[in-house]
Amino acid sequence: QVQLVESGGGLVQAGGSLRLSCAASGSIFRVNAMGWYRQAPGKQRELVASITSGGSTNYVDSVKGRFTISSDNAKNTVYLQMNSLKPEDTAVYYCNVRGTFDSYWGQGTQVTVPS
């Protein structure tokens, strides 16, 4: 059984930084990509950043230059370094791991940036 355990969320003042981590345990057949999504109250879940097994990254425009996604493929762990946080970054952040046959989700971690 695959489990994704997220950590690193919290409350931070505008301009501050947080680092999210997500570790996948269990057997995943050939991880193709890992990513972070977020969902703010009343809004749809959106892709924030993703990274393929080959290291290619993709970011939503609103976080480019502020957030950095990285991964440790040997440990099936993905990170999201978030700098220069803004109130509009407030959301529940979800880790996603996409294997060849399945997609897995973490339980979510709250990030709050007060205005």
Image: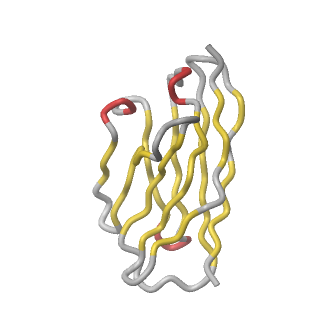
Query: In the rendered view of the protein, which quadrant contains the C terminus?
Result: top right
When asked about the image quadrant of residue 77, the answer is bottom right
User: How is the structure coloured here?
Assistant: secondary structure
Q: Is residue 23 left or right of residue 83?
A: right
Q: Is residue 94 left or right of residue 73?
A: right
Q: Front-most of 32 and 73?
A: 32
When asked about the image quadrant of residue 91, the answer is top right
Residue 4 pos. (x, y %): 62, 67
Q: Front-most of 9 and 115?
A: 115
The correct choice, above or below, for 65 with respect to 48 in the image is above
Specify the farthest residue to the top. 115
Q: What residue is drawn where x is 40% and y is 48%? A: 47
Q: Front-most of 81 and 89?
A: 89
Residue 50 pos. (x, y %): 38, 54
The correct choice, above or below, for 30 with respect to 82 in the image is below
Q: What residue is drawn where x is 47% and y is 47%? A: 45
Number of numbered tags placed on the structure image: 0
Query: In the rendered view of the protein, which quadrant contains the N terminus?
Result: bottom right
Residue 35 pos. (x, y %): 44, 56
The correct choice, above or below, for 53 with respect to 70 in the image is below
When asked about the image quadrant of residue 99, the answer is bottom left
Q: What residue is drawn where x is 71% and y is 36%? A: 10
Q: What residue is drawn where x is 59% and y is 17%? A: 14
Specify the farthest residue to the front. 42
